[in-house]
């Protein structure tokens, strides 16, 4: 079973929920798809086993063969190619690796080479396999790294996908193969607004959802009403606690230190496994 | 016009709260929300006058004319994004996977594939009482960086006479963040004093360095971990990046925001500390080269 954990707003507790959920499962694969800011590994501190570079293909020109017809430049919809001073030029940051330039070149002058954009790290802690996608700073597109991390995660009894914030294409890519979604909601005006956005995304993709309310000081009425109206089951409420915040800030896995919290997460996992999502 | 961008790397550290307060402190009449994936600034800034909305066209998307498609699958073979599936003998494009490269259109022997405009979001511009540009990306759409650029363009075009613009950014270090950095005079990074916060701060500073953007750092909820706060200050001193202050955790702050208020309107320790951060940031901004 693959569970995607998402929230829309950053800092709502995606990583906290993903890490603790995998920790109580004991036998699980944790995949960090928040490749721009991968933080799960700071908690797991996994024994590192493998690092695999992630690359994308970008065009490389055989200048001897290039006749200067500019068919590739005209074809490229991403403006990744230009013909400057009678020479083809590649703007690799905006290249989508579609292969169009290779295809349209009548002289077979366009080859492709790999350009590294990130890394997938694999490690383990106890029974949990930890897979982390890491995007290189300065790189624009997280998607190839997310795809590689998910591929590395593979199939298992339980895979927990720690998603990026927002609701754009990196989130989409992280969620698309999941069986269900856990939406982590922060009971604040900001948290609620972004929560509705990711819920719409999950609905669009036809994923059943359950809700975890994190840092639940006092009930935030609009969130409660929305869940009720939408038939969204609230599966867990985690109260704000300075102790939990301090454990988190120090990079500790809270459920390993707090038996009550571990019990709550076991309950959450059992509920999701029983199909309490809708 | 001087442009100040608020970023954080890690999400949820207080970018929007800081941006909203700065807008009031500075009495700024030009601001934008570039967190197009999860916009929130409109919840705490008064957007008065009439809204001008316009569609944002992202990449075009391939569409198959089922009447012309022979189901030969040539398009499926060449698509690098796995966006083509065959349904009942006819090729179908998945709009979420399609990146609009046009390779399928080029290989189709019957001309059944065409590329069509796709509304990938909406930009909203208010001109009164202040110029406020914001946007929302359609679910699961890519190219958020391009939308960020459009928001900034809408802001600059509508507020040419303003001397200061405050821009709320998005978390992370990828496409929308990089797009938001271009052309700004200073990035203020709101850091969180935790292991994750420090890690993310380093990654966003690295990104700012790559794009040669001037940065300053403040720490929000500093009392959550004094040790981490001191670590951040030391890192800034060594780097060197200007450190512009600490803001304490303040329950009144979250209550005020839930009530739709700006922190600038609340008399509390967080608000006072933020005012000092604001003053130091403005000084840095003034001395930054045009």
Image (cartoon, coloured by chain):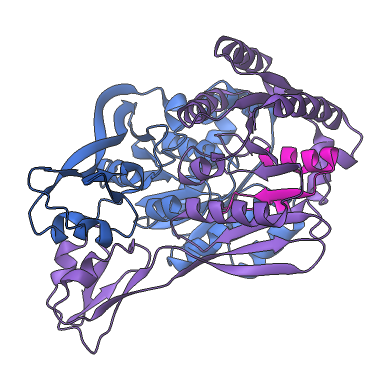
Q: Please give left or right for residue A133 compared with residue B71 in the image.
A: right
Residue B175 at x, y percent in the picture: 46, 45
Q: Vertical placement of B250 versus B246: above or below?
A: below
Tell me: residue B264, above or below residue A99: above
Image location (x, y in percent) of residue B205: 53, 26
Residue B182, compared with residue B200, is above or below; it is: below
Between A107 and B136, the one lying in front of the other is: A107
Quadrant of the image occupied by residue A129:
top left
Quadrant of image for the C terminus of chain B: top right
Question: From the image, which quarter does the N terminus of chain B lie in?
Answer: top right
Work out whether residue B210 can be spotted.
yes
Say whether residue A100 is visible: no
The extreme front residue here reads: A85
Residue under the point 26% across and 41% down: A152
**Between residues B39 and B211, which one lies in front from this camera angle?**
B211
Left or right: where does residue A143 sit relative to residue B30?
left
Find the magenta span and give its range: B15-41
| Residue at 56% across, 9% down | B238
Chain letter corresponding to the colour blue? A
In this structure image, what is the colour of chain B? purple
Task: Tell me the quarter of the picture where residue B289 sits.
Answer: top right
Magenta residue check for B22 = yes
Q: Residue B41 placed where, x, y %?
A: 71, 50
């Amino acid at each position: 079973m693959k569970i995607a954990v998402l929230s829309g707003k950053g800092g709502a507790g995606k990583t906290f929920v993903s890490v603790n959920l995998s920790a109580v499962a004991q036998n699980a694969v944790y995949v960090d798809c928040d490749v721009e800011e991968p933080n799960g590994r700071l908690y797991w501190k996994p024994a590192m086993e493998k690092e695999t570079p992630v690359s994308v293909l970008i065009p490389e020109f055989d200048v001897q063969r290039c006749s200067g017809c500019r068919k590739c430049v005209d074809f490229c919809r991403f403006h990744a190619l230009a013909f400057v001073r009678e020479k083809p030029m590649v703007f690799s940051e905006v290249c989508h690796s579609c292969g169009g330039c290779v295809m349209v070149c009548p002289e077979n002058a366009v080859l492709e080479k790999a350009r590294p954009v990130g890394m997938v790290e694999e490690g383990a802690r106890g029974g949990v396999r930890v897979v982390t996608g890491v995007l290189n700073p300065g790189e624009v597109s997280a998607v190839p790294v997310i795809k590689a991390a998910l591929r590395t995660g593979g199939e298992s009894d339980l895979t927990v996908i720690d998603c990026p914030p927002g609701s754009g294409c990196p989130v989409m890519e992280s969620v698309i193969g999941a069986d269900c979604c856990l939406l982590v909601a922060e009971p604040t005006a900001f948290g609620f607004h972004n929560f509705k956005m990711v819920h719409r995304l999950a609905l669009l993709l036809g994923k059943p959802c359950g809700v975890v309310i994190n840092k639940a000081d006092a009930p935030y009425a609009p969130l409660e009403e929305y869940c009720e109206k939408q038939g969204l089951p609230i599966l867990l409420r985690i109260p704000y606690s300075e102790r939990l915040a301090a454990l988190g800030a120090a990079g500790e896995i809270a459920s390993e230190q707090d038996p009550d919290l571990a019990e709550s997460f076991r309950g959450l996992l059992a509920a999701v496994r029983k199909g309490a999502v809708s | 016009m001087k442009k100040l961008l608020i970023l954080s790397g890690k999400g949820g550290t207080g970018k929007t709260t800081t941006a909203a307060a700065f807008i009031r402190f500075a009495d700024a009449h030009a601001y934008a929300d570039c967190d197009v994936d999860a916009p929130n600034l409109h919840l705490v800034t008064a957007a008065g006058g009439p809204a001008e909305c316009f569609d944002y066209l992202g990449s075009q998307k391939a569409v198959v004319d089922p009447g012309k498609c022979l189901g030969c699958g040539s398009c499926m073979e060449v698509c690098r994004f796995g966006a083509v599936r065959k349904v009942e003998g006819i090729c179908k494009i998945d709009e979420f996977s399609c990146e609009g490269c046009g390779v399928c259109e080029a290989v189709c022997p019957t001309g059944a594939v065409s590329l069509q405009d796709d509304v990938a979001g909406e930009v909203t511009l208010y001109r009164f009482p202040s110029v406020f540009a914001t946007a929302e990306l359609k679910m699961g759409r890519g190219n958020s960086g391009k939308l960020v650029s459009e928001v900034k363009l809408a802001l600059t075009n509508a507020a040419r006479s303003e001397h200061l613009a405050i821009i709320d950014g998005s978390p992370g270090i990828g496409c929308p963040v990089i797009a938001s950095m271009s052309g700004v005079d200073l990035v203020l990074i709101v850091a969180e004093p935790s292991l994750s916060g420090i890690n993310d701060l380093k990654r966003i500073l690295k990104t700012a360095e790559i794009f040669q953007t001037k940065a300053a750092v403040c720490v929000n909820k500093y009392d959550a971990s004094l040790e981490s706060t001191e670590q951040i200050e030391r890192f800034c001193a060594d780097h060197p990046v200007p450190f512009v202050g600490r803001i304490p955790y303040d329950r009144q702050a979250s209550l005020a925001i839930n009530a739709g208020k700006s922190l600038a309107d609340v008399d509390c320790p967080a608000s006072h500390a933020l005012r000092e951060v604001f003053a130091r940031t403005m000084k840095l901004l003034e001395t930054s080269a045009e």
